[in-house]
Image (cartoon, grey):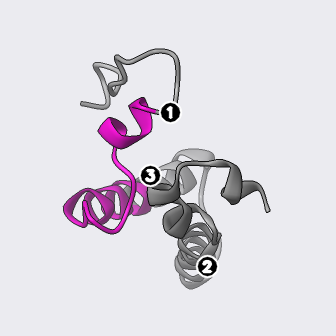
Amino acid sequence: MACMGGPAKHRAKIHSNNPIERLNGEITRRSNVAGIFPNEAAVTRLIGALLLEQNDEWAVQRARYMTLETIATLGDDRHVSLPPLAA
């Protein structure tokens, strides 16, 4: 399994696609409720709002998900941060 090649402390967090599958399911569920979108901007707003909501949830649960600081130790570039617009 690919996750076994990573650091031991990250294995439990990357061995499963469940968080991503849950997010995809939530996007599908909410878009089905909306039905027909009037334009592409409406779809972007809905999915963007869902992604921001999920990001906030993941940020609060630091112990459950990997953070930028823990991921930084995996690469050559020790300075890992969000782009200015995302921060």
Disc 3 residue type? Gly
Tell which of 86 and 13 is nearer to you: 13
Name the residue that disc number 2 marks: 25
Residue 3: x and y in percent read 68, 58
How far apart are the alpha carbons under marks 3 and 2?
A: 15 Å
Residue at the far right in the pictured view: 1
Image quarter where the C terminus lies is: top left
Disc 2 residue type? Gly
Q: Which residues are magenta?
A: 50-73
Along the polypeptide, which appears first: circle 2 or circle 1?
2
How far apart are the alpha carbons under marks 2 and 1?
A: 30 Å
Q: Residues within 10 Å of mark 1 (few under 14, many from 20)?
A: few
Instruction: Quadrant for residue 80, please give it.
Output: top left
Residue 71: x and y in percent read 43, 39
Tell which of 33 and 47 is nearer to you: 47
Main SS class of the magenta portion in the image: helix
- Left or right of residue 2: residue 28: left
Disc 1 residue type? Leu
Image quarter where the N terminus lies is: bottom right
Q: Is residue 81 above or below residue 25?
A: above
Name the residue that disc number 1 marks: 74
Numbered disc in front, either 1 or 3 = 1
Q: Is residue 59 above or below residue 68?
A: below
Name the residue that disc number 3 marks: 48
Tell which of 42 and 48 is nearer to you: 48
